[in-house]
Image (cartoon, grey):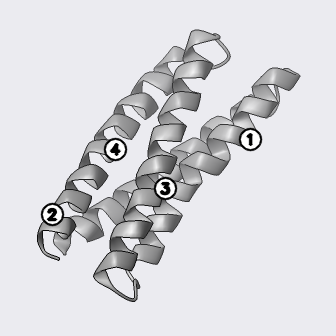
Amino acid sequence: MSRNIDITKRTFEFAINIVKLAGKLSKDSSPARTLSNQVLRAGTSVGANIEEAQAAESKADFIHKYNIALEEARETRYWLKLLSASNMAEKTDLISLTKESDEICRIIAQIIINARREE
């Protein structure tokens, strides 16, 4: 359970950093604003789904919500890579966020594996 609390806090902090990035991008060109919206939706959804999983009605519901969080984390990683490849954001912002999204994906995937073993 402590790992779940850690990932809840970690994804909340990640969402804060995504919001800050989106705020910077929303002042730029139309493509940057569009990508900003995409990364904002996906990046903030990760933690929201994990938060929902804490009140899951069953183990299957818990796993389902974590699977959605993993999908959103992977989508966020995609948008961050696209922002980097298209040079639409500061590399320093993107490097740390991309690294964190990779780590979050790995942690969530392991939580899912562990939860399935416990079924």
Alpha carbon distance from label 4 to label 1: 21 Å
Q: Give the quarter of the image for residue 86.
A: top right
Q: Residue at x 51, y 26 (%)?
A: 93
Secondary structure under tag 1 reads helix
Label whose residue precedes the other's in the sequence (1 or 2):
1
Residue at 26% across, 63% down: 6
Q: What residue is shown with label 3?
A: 46
The CA span between labels 1 and 2 is 33 Å
Q: Nearer the viewer, mark 4 or mark 2?
A: 2
Nearest-to-viewer mark from 1 and 2: 2
Type of residue at label 3? Val
In the displayed structure, does residue 47 sit left or right of residue 33?
left
Q: Nearer the viewer, mark 2 or mark 3?
A: 2
Which kind of residue does numbered mark 1 sit on? Asn
- Which label was assigned to residue 105? 4
Q: Percent position (x, y) of residue 98?
A: 42, 30
